[in-house]
Amino acid sequence: MKFVDEATIEVIAGKGGNGSASFRREKFIPKGGPDGGDGGRGGSVIARADRNINTLVDYRFARKHLARNGENGRGSDQYGAGADDVVLRMPVGTMIYDAETNELLHDLDTHGQTVTLAKGGQGGLGNIRFKSSINRAPRQFTPGEDGEQRRLRLELKVLADVGLLGMPNAGKSTLISKISNARPKIADYPFTTLHPNLGVVRTSAERSFVVADIPGLIEGASEGAGLGHLFLRHLSRTRILLHLVDLSNPDPDADRISQAVKEMQAIEKELQRYDQALFDKPRWLILNKLDMVEDPEAAREAFLASSQWKGPVFTISALTGDGTRKLIYALQDALDVARDKQHLEDGVTGDEDVEIDPRFDPTRGDQQ
């Protein structure tokens, strides 16, 4: 299925039913009085976040969503029935904007969250509502109200704790397949990843986090090169970015270290062009494919000296799994600390303290 992360739809709520102006007419009951009922409420259009849906593809083709009108009121004190609401199931992480003003209306960030996109019109009043001691035969009634109508833009930003960043064929798909339950397409040509992949990494029975793999970036992505950088929106909710760099050297005549540094700096430039807030997120450097390097330690030191990188660094081989266990435990520890800090800021207290793995300092990377 093609990944679709943006769509524009129109939602139209139902009109309320009209009230009725009716009088009771039965044998042997003269001057029976008013008996016109109210109209029913029009149906609303509602959005509900559902973690079992991954894309907005349904809304790329079904662009108009209408709720039914409420029934009109009738005589004999019969009230019109209200119309059923229309419920639109959307992926968790869907952001709903007003298509005309670009105002953010709703952010569906929790499974089961429900919001009203267009409210149904109220039903009109029947003449039974206007009966009084001085108005015994009212002929007044009111029509039903129109339902709301809106054009909306839907934008999906996947929910993940950790985002993978890097050039095509840096090994992102291999890494996410090794450390999580995700099974992305893996091949030896660029842009095998055409849409974001999510995987759950479980470090114990109670501890886990979610990783997102997006299509690779290349220099000039902000101008449309490669697949562009629109998929970077899916990293905006992450807490930590893993920047994968390929240190293997398929060309013996090439200076792989300087090439790898150039590729890393190109990714940083594209990241900053897209969103400064995303560029400022905590970012860890992951030196990958060291199984294909003759002297991994020398390559690591040469790269760090040339790039002048100051943040956490991990050396791994995504293919063989070397170094990945150390990486995921450090990520889990850092995420637990970040979550505890967020809970304190929000005034939320947990049932028990999280025990941080003492083996690694997540702010330093590999412990040499």
Image (spheres, rainbow, N blue to C red):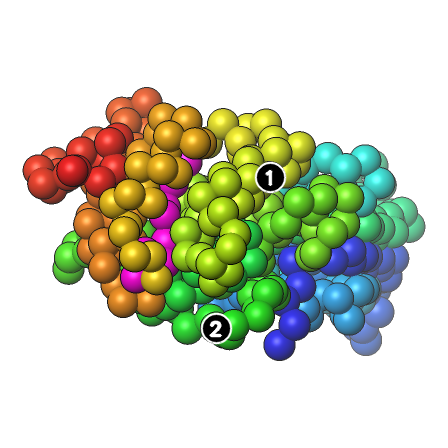
Identified by mark 2, the residue type is Ile
Disc 2: which residue: 186
Please say if 269 is above or below 149.
above
Determine whether the residue tagged by mark 1 lies in a helix, strand or loop.
Answer: helix
Identified by mark 1, the residue type is Ala
Give me the residue at 31% from left, 37% from top.
301
Please say if 356 is above or below 115.
above
Give me the residue at 41% from left, 45% from top.
242
Position of 7 compared to 164: left or right?
Answer: right
Q: Nearer the viewer, mark 2 or mark 1?
A: 1
The x and y percentages for residue 108 are 54, 49
Can the viewer see residue 361?
yes
Please tell me which residue lies in front, 166 or 276: 166
| Residue 286 is covered by the magenta coloring | yes
Determine whether the residue tagged by mark 2 lies in a helix, strand or loop.
Answer: loop
* Marks 2/1: CA–CA distance: 23 Å
Please say if 157 is above or below 201.
above
Disc 1: which residue: 266
Position of 217 compared to 110: left or right?
Answer: right
Magenta range: 283-291
Q: Main secondary structure of the magenta part?
A: strand
The x and y percentages for residue 155 are 66, 51
How dense is the environment of label 1, judged by Cα within 10 Å: few (below 14), some, or many (20 and up)? some
The x and y percentages for residue 26 are 80, 73
